[in-house]
Image (cartoon, rainbow, N blue to C red):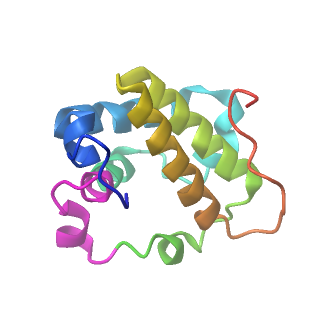
Amino acid sequence: MQATEQSGLPPYQRIGGDTVIRKLVDRFYELMDELPETYAARKIHPADLTGSANKLFDYLSGWLGGPQRYVEKHGHPMLRRRHLPYAIGPDERDQWLLCMQMALTDTVADEALRTALFAQFVQLGEHMRNRPGATPIRQPGGH
């Protein structure tokens, strides 16, 4: 995430550090596994989500201004390049965002932080899209 929030603390600290990031990631993948409407996003992940969850936790830690675990373990994220083998169109993007929005709502108490983080996730989701479909981002929840 680019900016430090108005409190002067990085989002990593504002969110609650590792404990809340782990809860966010766990809830995100629980939702992806449970919601039938996220099938397209779920099917591009392995059957066992443990590795994906660990990588997302490591990535979010650094992205939010905390320890750079992902970089230490895997090098520069190069997220778009790493995701090119997977068909990510508007449906996959929107389904991923639905899971993230719901997980943020369930795990992050600070509404302003949730809103700021989700706005960044929307940009990230669009950046990952690598298949045609010039559809605008459909905000989960009909917004």
Vertical side of 82 occupied by 99: above or below: above
Vertical side of 122 occupied by 83: above or below: below
Q: Residue at x 44, y 44 (%)?
A: 117
- Is residue 78 magenta-colored? no
> In this image, 28 relative to 84: left or right?
left
The one of 9 and 39 positioned closer to us in this rendering: 9
Q: Residue at x 73, y 59 (%)?
A: 89
> In this image, 104 relative to 137: left or right?
left
Give the position of the C terminus as an image quadrant: top right
**Residue 97 horizontal/vertical position (percent):** 59, 43
Q: Residue at x 66, y 52 (%)?
A: 93
State the image quarter where residue 85 is shown.
bottom right
Magenta stretch mostly in which secondary structure? helix
State the image quarter where residue 88 is shown.
bottom right
Vertical side of 23 occupied by 94: above or below: below
> In this image, 11 relative to 104: left or right?
left
> In this image, 23 relative to 105: left or right?
left
For residue 32, say whether it is visible: no
**Residue 25 horizontal/vertical position (percent):** 36, 39
Q: Residue at x 36, y 34 (%)?
A: 24
Q: Where does the magenta region start and end? A: 58-76
